[in-house]
Amino acid sequence: MPSDRERTTAARRAGASVAGLMAEIADVGRDGARGGYSRPVYSTAEHELREWFVDQAARRGLDVETDRNGILWAWWDAPGSGRHDAVVTGSHLDSVPGGGAFDGPLGVASALIAVDRLRERGLTPGKPLALAVFPEEEGSRFGVACLGSRLLTGLIDPDRARTLRDPEGNTFADVAAKAGLDPRFLGPDPEAVGRIGSFVELHVEQGRGLIDLGQSVAVGSTILGHGRWRITVAGQGNHAGTTHMEDRRDPLVAAAAIVQAVREAALRHSGARATVGRIVPVPGGTNVIASSVSLWLDVRHVDDAVTAAVVERIHADARRVAAVEGCSVELREESLSPTAHFDPALRHRVGELLPEAPTLPTGAGHDAGVLAAVRPTAMLFVRNPSGISHSPEEHVEDDDAEAGAAALADVLAGLIGGA
Ligand code: HGY
Ligand code: MN
Ligand code: MN
C-alpha cells in the first residue's frame, strides 16, 4: 500500500498541477460547431470527465462513492456515522453549450491539487475531508440549475425532477437510470447533508472583479438571486408563401418584441439582469410560419422582490405584444434561487486564512448557493483575465490557477485542523 508521500509523488508525476490536470481533459467535449465545450450532464463527455475524476481521486487514495442523486464524493477518511463535521470542497463538470474550459472543472481540479498540497505539507486531517462533484449544475440539459444539489437538499420535488425532459424528450429518470442511478431513490438525502460541517467551492470568476482588483483569488460574499422562466407564445402555423401578411398570427414576431421588452424591463431596475438566450420555434422550418415559440428567460437581482417585479413586468408586456399579433402567451417558472449570503462565521474564518484576498459578490449561480441554505458554505474565486464566461473566451492563467489551489489548500488546512 503506497504511503501518503509516495501517493503524492506519484500524483505530482502525473501532471499534478491545476494546469496539468486541466490539460488532461482539454479535449473532452469540445464543440466544433459552437466553439468551447458542450458537456451536458450524463452525456458521453461528462461521463468521461466523471471517470477522469474518479481515477484522479483513486490515485490519491481517496474513496469514491456515488450517492443516490449522482453526486460523487471522494473521501480522505470517510466520516463514521454520526459525524457532522466533514469539510467538503468541489464543484461541477457539466457545462453550458459552447462553454468555457474552467466553469466547474477548475474547482474540481483545484480540489485534487489541494489534496496534493495538504499531503506535501504532511498534514493528516483532524476531520473527514471530501471532494464532491455535483451533476447538472448548469441545468443545460434538463432546465433546472443545480439539479443535483437541489435534489440532495430537498429543494426540488423528486417527482418533478424525474419527469424533467431534455430537448430530445428523454426524461431525467430514464437518463439517470442509464447513468446507473435508481430513479426511485432520487431525492433528499439528509444523512449526506448532515455529514457536511462546511462546504467550500472554488470557481473561476465569471466577471471582471479580480481584474480590476489586480488579485488572483477572492472570497465570495453573496450569489445574486436568479431564476428561469419558460415563455410559450402560441400563434397560427402556416405556409410562408400562401399566407398574406395581414392574415398572420406569427408567434416569432411576438417573440421578437418580447425579447426587446425583456431588456427594457431590466433597464428599469438598477442592477437587474434579464436575458433571453434560447428561442425555439415549432416546427422551425425556413418556409414555415411557426405555430408556437418557446423563449427561456433568465432574470437576476440581489433583491428577490425586484427579480419578481421584473418578471411580472415582462409577463405583462409579453401578453400585450402577443395580443397585438393575435397570439397567446404562457409564462412558467422553471427554477428560482433567492440571493445567497454565505455563512458569516465561515466567511470570517476563510478571511483569516486568506488575509490578502478581497471579497467579491457573484452574479453567477453555484451549487454553493444551494448548500448555503442548509450548511455553512463559502466560495473562492480565481481571476479570469477575459472577464468573460459561458463562452470559449473564459480563461485562467496557470499561475492564478496554482494560486487558487494553494489558497484552497490553506483554507482546507485551516478547517480540517489535524496535525
Ligand atoms: O447560470 C449560472 O449562473 C451558473 O453558471 N450556472
Ligand atoms: Mn456556469
Ligand atoms: Mn459553474
Image (cartoon, rainbow, N blue to C red):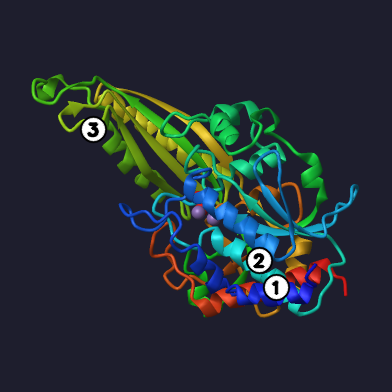
Residue drawn at the location 84% of the way across and 68% of the way down = 125
Label 3 crowd (10 A; few <14 / some 14-19 / many >=20): some
Q: Residue type at mark 3: give it.
A: Val
Which numbered disc flags the more N-terminal residue, 3 or 1? 1
Query: Distance from label 3 to label 1 (Cα)?
Result: 56 Å
Q: Tell me the quarter of the picture where residue 256 sits.
A: top left
State the image coordinates of residue 103 (x, y, percent, origin top left): 51, 59
Q: Of tags 3 and 1, which is closer to the observer?
A: 1
Label 2 crowd (10 A; few <14 / some 14-19 / many >=20): many
Q: Are marks 2 and 1 in contact (CB under 8 Å)?
A: yes
Residue drawn at the location 65% of the way across and 41% of the way down = 150
Q: Which residue corresponds to mark 2?
A: 112
Query: Distance from label 2 to label 3 (Cα)?
Result: 50 Å
SS type, badge 3 = helix
Instruction: State the mark number for residue 116.
Output: 1
Q: Residue type at mark 2: give it.
A: Leu
Q: Is residue 8 visible?
A: yes
Q: Which residue corresponds to mark 3?
A: 253
Q: As drawn, is 354 to the left or to the right of 231? A: right
